[in-house]
Image (cartoon, rainbow, N blue to C red):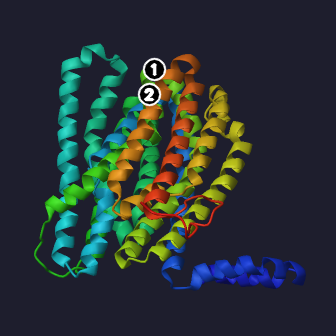
Amino acid sequence: MPIMAVIETAERLLPAGLRARVAPLTGRIRATVTENSDTARAQRQAMTAFAIRIFSAAIAFLSQIVMARLMGEFEYGLFAFVWVIVILVGNLSCLGFHTSIIRFIHQHSAEGESGEIRGLSLAACLVALVTSTVIGGLGFAFLWAFGSSIEPYYIVPVAIALFIIPMIGIGDILDGIARTHGWTISALAPTYILRPILILTFMTAAVLSDAPRDAQTAMLAALAATYATTFAHLTQLILRLKGSYGNASRRYRLGSWIRYSIPLFVVDGIGFLLTNADVVVVGIFLPPDDVGIYFAASKTIVLVQFVYFSIKAAAAPRFAAIMAEGDMTALATFAGQTVRWTFWPSLVVGLTTLAAGELLLSLFGDAFTSGYILMVILFAGILSKSLVGPGEVLLSMAGRQKLCVAVYTATLAGSIVLNVVLIPHYGLVGAAMATAGAMMIEATLLHIAVRRTLGIVLFAFSDPLPRPSFKVL
């Protein structure tokens, strides 16, 4: 393997003393690359996901710089505000199936229920399509009824956005199907690499064709890119899964699937709101110029969160598999590993990003450098979340999704209170403080919830297995 060749070459070139000191590290890397254990596979999936997210972050970052330079602060802020709403609503239109499908496919596969797997895959896509279509219809009705009370520059971009939402929802379902099978590249590359490249390509082509450099043109580019990406991903998965589950007739267990998925829908919805609500709230209270500055700062420091998202993508299938086996010791051990995999890379990536923060923001334009303090505040919140790793995924895969609902409901309530109190007084800084504070509340509640229900200590500096005297509720 190329990676192994690099490791072996580096070991030969190092002085004997230094070679001995780095031997434990190279040994762990060698084991991760070559071993076929479940943990090693999960590590490889996490590393692949992280590499994709880093590459996609670079693409997204460069594309956002180009978009900001092409459109200016106002139009860029307007586009950012509408695009965040599209992603948020599209994700919610899955009704939790993009997460629950991971557990159910593992469960039905273990029981040899190919018909249920085929039925679930189709049902999940149809749920996302129908729900998002209904949302789109309601959105057009809202624009028709209340359009006169909305700032005119929002009308056309929002109308275009309503056509994009169904493809976002179906795309999230396809991501979940690919993740279930351990196809990390197939799961992440369409959304995080192909789509931003196509958005930038279509936007650049439009500008070169003398199209207006505004949010409307940007949303049309996003519309074309999203449809192309989703149909390409769907075709790829159909071909790859062809024959995997035989020709069994599709069978449906909609009742049990929906009962499990709806709490996840609430959890994911609240979590997604917590991740994106800051941009939405800033857009409600402040003009598009400020939205542009805040969006640039948050998308720059969000590089750190890609560590968490990568671990989350790799951990969910492994958590589900361990739960199916019923091995709680293995579950605790793996959960502790995911926390360490999340925290230390997040710390390194975050400090590196902050060191280059002002330079990175200046690439968007001179006015955007005022967002550096926002990056510092947001990093504090992100780092607190990384201290407990993907705790909500652990709870969900363990069947404690209702507890997740309670945790995230409390977190969202805290976030709303913080936003309402801080933004009117402190503007953009208040929005960043509210977001960071909500992340700290979330991390604290997840730590307590996992410890009290599963007996697992989720903290980067603790043993995941508690003292024998500890009682699990």
Circle 1 sits in a helix, a strand or a loop, which is it? helix
Q: Is residue 227 visible?
A: no
Cα distance in 3D space between marks 2 and 1: 6 Å
Q: Is residue 119 above or below residue 198?
A: below
* Tag 2–tag 1 contact (CB < 8 Å): yes
Where is residue 286 drawn, in percent x and y?
A: 48, 20
Q: Residue at x 58, y 20 (%)?
A: 426
Judge from the rendering whether residue 24 lies leftward or rightward of residue 259; answer left or right. right
Judge from the rendering whether residue 378 lies leftward or rightward of residue 223; answer left or right. right
Where is residue 117 drawn, in percent x and y?
A: 21, 72
Image quadrant in which you'd find residue 375: top right
Q: Is residue 383 above or below residue 154?
A: below
Circle 2 sits in a helix, a strand or a loop, which is it? helix
Q: Which mark is residue 281?
A: 2
Q: Disc 2 residue type? A: Val
Q: Residue at x 30, y 49 (%)?
A: 265
The one of 44 and 72 positioned closer to us in this rendering: 44
Q: Residue at x 34, y 38 (%)?
A: 220
Image quadrant in which you'd find residue 408: top left
Q: Name the residue carrying label 1.
A: 285
Disc 1 crowd, CA 10 A, few/some/many (<14, 14-19, 20+): some
Q: Is residue 37 above or below residue 142?
A: below
